[in-house]
Image (cartoon, grey):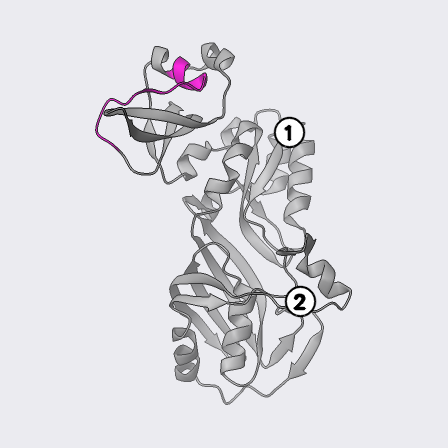
């Protein structure tokens, strides 16, 4: 888990981790824009196979909203579209505007985003001056609290569902207040169970590249699934992709198969022929590696 710095892309982080660890199989879960810093979950080796599950997690952000300025990217890195006086906006008025975006609502993603239209990222189309109508998406803001008020700047702590754009939240709040607004800064302080206090910066990872295990976390700790640590003979069957009897009652949702802190597979508990069984859905470690697993 990396504490991404401002000014680089999430892809830049992945490329540098590849060089530091001398590994090609590196990815990430949940993109951060160059303007943003904070928690970027970087996945290495077989952990890249669980990226889709980690992306489902909720996120926590600390952000600065700048009132009175509207830009084409909805943050301060874009071209200014309008400027308006915002000194008359009170904290109470701002609180009322923020309250409209607590809970579940529809959000229109920004033109400058990685969302694809006919196979093309929206930001590439926007750079060519091509305007695309994007359908609104359902998002949820679980918590939005004002942590500071220094007009024309407001500081927010937000906990939200995946796919919620903080840039757009800033833009929409400013628009509702009639003065415009954009995002000035953004820090992701949490992604699922991964928090900023446990993240490492790239320089620290580079210094400890010879023994990076102390800086790496098992993806099992970030998955919101019940853990199952079977006996060796059952584990061998699971890692061959075979269905095994489940030693308990039926469970809903995915199950993480682990050995200690090591994530080996994902699967589901279902009822087949009146028997409760565990069905492997994704194998992260091949069976031939089981002899290397330290229980």
Percent position of residue 170, x then y:
53, 71
Q: Which residue is mark 1?
A: 21
Residue 47's x, y, as percent? 52, 31
Q: Indicate yes or no whether the magenta region holds residue 240.
A: yes
Task: Name which quarter of the figure residue 220 lies in.
Answer: top left
37 to 236, vertically: above or below: below
Q: Which residue is mark 2?
A: 132
**Residue 238, placed above or below residue 95:** above
Of all residues shown, which one is farthest toward the front? 273
Residue at screen point 51% across, 56% down: 163
Residue 206 sits in quarter = top right
Residue drawn 56% across the image and 73% down it: 171
- Mark closer to the chain start, 1 or 2: 1
Q: Nearer the viewer, residue 131 or 188?
A: 131
Of labels 1 and 2, the one closer to you:
2
Q: In the image, residue 71 lies at what x, y percent? A: 66, 74
Looking at the picture, does residue 248 appear above or below residue 237?
below
Residue at position x 52%, y 27% in the image: 213
Q: Secondary structure at mark 2?
A: loop
Q: Could you tell me if residue 261 is visible in this image?
A: no
Span shown in magenta: 235-250
* Residue 230 as seen in the image, left or right of residue 134: left
**Local crowd size for mark 2, using a 10 Å CA cut-off: few (<14), some (14–19), many (≥20):** few
Number of numbered discs = 2
**Front residue of 187 and 277:** 277
Tell whether position 113 is magenta: no
How much space separates mark 1 and mark 2, taking CA atoms? 40 Å
Residue at x-position 42% and y-position 84%: 93
């Amino acid at each position: 888990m990396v504490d991404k710095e401002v000014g680089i892309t999430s892809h830049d982080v992945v490329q540098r981790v590849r060089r530091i660890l001398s590994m090609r199989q590196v990815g990430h879960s949940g993109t951060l824009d160059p303007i943003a810093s904070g928690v970027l979950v970087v996945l290495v080796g077989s952990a890249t196979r669980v990226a889709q599950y980690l992306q489902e997690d909720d996120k926590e952000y600390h952000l600065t909203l700048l009132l009175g300025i509207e830009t084409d990217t909805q943050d301060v890195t874009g071209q200014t579209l309008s400027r308006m006086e915002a000194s008359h906006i009170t904290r109470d008025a701002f609180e009322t505007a923020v309250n409209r975006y607590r809970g579940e609502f529809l959000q229109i993603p920004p033109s400058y985003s990685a969302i694809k239209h006919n196979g093309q990222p929206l930001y590439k189309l926007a750079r060519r001056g091509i305007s695309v109508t994007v359908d609104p998406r359902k998002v949820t803001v679980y918590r939005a609290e004002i942590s500071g008020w220094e007009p024309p700047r407001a500081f927010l702590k937000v906990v939200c569902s995946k796919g919620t754009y903080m840039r757009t939240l800033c833009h929409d709040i400013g628009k509702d207040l009639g003065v415009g607004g954009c995002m000035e800064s953004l820090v992701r302080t949490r992604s699922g169970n991964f928090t900023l206090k446990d993240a490492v910066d790239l320089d620290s990872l580079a210094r400890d590249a010879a023994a990076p295990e102390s800086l790496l976390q098992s993806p099992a700790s970030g998955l919101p699934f019940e853990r199952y640590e079977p006996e060796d003979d059952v584990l061998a069957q699971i890692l061959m992709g075979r269905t095994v009897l489940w030693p308990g009652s039926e469970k809903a949702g995915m199950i993480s198969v682990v050995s200690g802190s090591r994530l080996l597979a994902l699967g589901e508990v279902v009822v087949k022929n009146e028997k409760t069984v565990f069905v492997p859905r994704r194998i992260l470690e091949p069976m031939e590696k089981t002899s290397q697993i330290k229980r």
